[in-house]
Amino acid sequence: MKICVFSDSHAYAANMIAAIELEQADCMFFLGDGAKDLQTVQERFPWLPIYAVCGNCDFMSGLEQLLRCEVEGVRIFAVHGHRSNVNYEYRMDTLAYQAIEAGADIALFGHTHKQYLSENKGVTLINPGSIGRGYYPGYALLTIEDGKFDAELKTI
């Protein structure tokens, strides 16, 4: 299964659509700040499962602050990050502990607009960067097979 992970589109859905088409994604995660863009993606790909959380700019979106789910045997914890103490210095302990408490293998987060892929306390932490307009719009690609995953950071 191929999963595109996006965050921080900020009213620009075109890069998400391009990445989904390029990767031929089976599913996507959206980590906030651009919740209104999800409607455009859903209209273009009505069959695509979308998991989403709200960001600090998604006022009145109705999306949850955090998400715990299992996809193909991999447990995923997803947040925007602004309530998990992530910042530009990448202090990730709070996020790692939240993910451990949730029993997750992977913690997905956004907010900083900078790509990040690392392991902390046995949890893989992934920030896809900002998929919105910018010099290097980024996303993450998760590939899950037989309960195991591979993650890579990409630009569009």
Image (cartoon, rainbow, N blue to C red):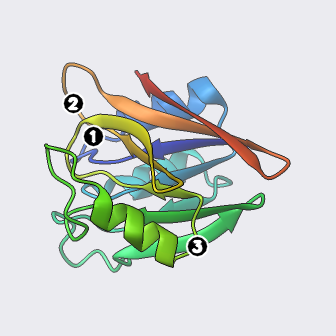
* Image position of 56 with respect to 87: above or below: below
Q: Which one is closest to the eye, mark 3 or mark 2?
A: 3
Mark 1–mark 2 CB contact (< 8 Å): yes
Q: In this image, 90 relative to 88: left or right?
A: right
Residue 80 seen from this side:
no
The residue tagged 1 is 12
Nearer the N terminus, badge 3 or badge 1? 1
- Mark 1 vs 2, N-terminal side: 1
**Which quadrant, please, contains the C terminus?**
top left
Quarter the N terminus occupies: top right
Residue 139's x, y, as percent?
42, 34
Residue 21 at what x, y percent from top left?
A: 59, 29
Q: Determine the CA span between mark 3 and mark 1.
A: 33 Å
Q: Which quadrant would residue 22 be assigned to in this image?
A: top right
- The residue lying toward the viewer, choosing from 85 and 20, is 85
Q: Does residue 16 appear in this view?
A: yes
Badge 1 marks a residue whose secondary structure is: loop
Q: Which label is found at residue 103?
A: 3
Mark 2 — residue? 133
The amino acid sitting under disc 2 is: Arg
Mark 3 vs 2: CB contact within 8 A:
no
Dots 3, 1 in contact, CB < 8 A: no
Labels 3, 1: front one: 3
x, y (%) of residue 117? 42, 37
Query: Along the line of sight, which residue is nearer the eye, 94 or 148?
Result: 94
- Residue in the image at 21% along x and 56% along y: 86
The local secondary structure at tag 3 comes to loop
Q: CA distance from mark 1 to mark 2?
A: 7 Å
From what the image shows, is residue 61 above or below residue 120? Answer: below
Q: Secondary structure at mark 2?
A: loop
